[in-house]
Image (cartoon, grey):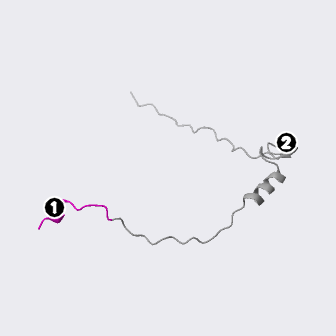
Amino acid sequence: MAPSRVTLVAPPVRETPTMSDELLSFECPRCHNDVNEAFYGPCGTCRDRLRATFAGEARQVEAAAYEPKMNVTPNAVATKD
């Protein structure tokens, strides 16, 4: 009896979901105003206020020099004379 052939079929290719151009209408969870935004969350005005309030400035931080710990005791073989 001849071996049967197995045909491999690839799964169908799905299109990746794309962001819709439609805006969502919802109440801003922060200021409770009705807004139209692409994503749920604080409205543009609230986002600008949050950025201004919590904006951090980059700065150079100098780290201390590395000094290895000396809390390891040598084993008996290493100290054998």
Locate the C terminus by quadrant.
Answer: bottom left
Front-lying residue, 76 or 26: 76
Vertical position of residue 14 compared to residue 74: above or below: above
**Callout 2 secondary element:** loop
Q: Which residues are magenta?
A: 70-81
Q: Amino acid at mark 1?
A: Val
Q: Which residue is mark 2?
A: 32
Considering every residue shown, the one lying at the far left of the view is 81
Vertical position of residue 3 compared to residue 26: above or below: above
Residue 45 placed where, x, y %?
84, 53
Considering every residue shown, the one lying at the far top of the view is 1
- Residue positioned 63% across, 70% down in the render: 59
Front-lying residue, 26 or 8: 26
In the rendered image, which quarter is residue 50 located in? bottom right
Marks 2 and 1 sit apart, C-alpha to C-alpha, by 72 Å
Q: Which residue is mark 1?
A: 77
Residue 3 placed where, x, y %?
41, 31
In the rendered image, which quarter is residue 9 located in? top right
Considering every residue shown, the one lying at the far front of the view is 71
Q: Amino acid at mark 2?
A: His
Q: Main secondary structure of the magenta part?
A: loop
Vertical position of residue 1 compared to residue 51: above or below: above
Which one is earlier in the sequence, the residue at label 2 or at label 1? 2
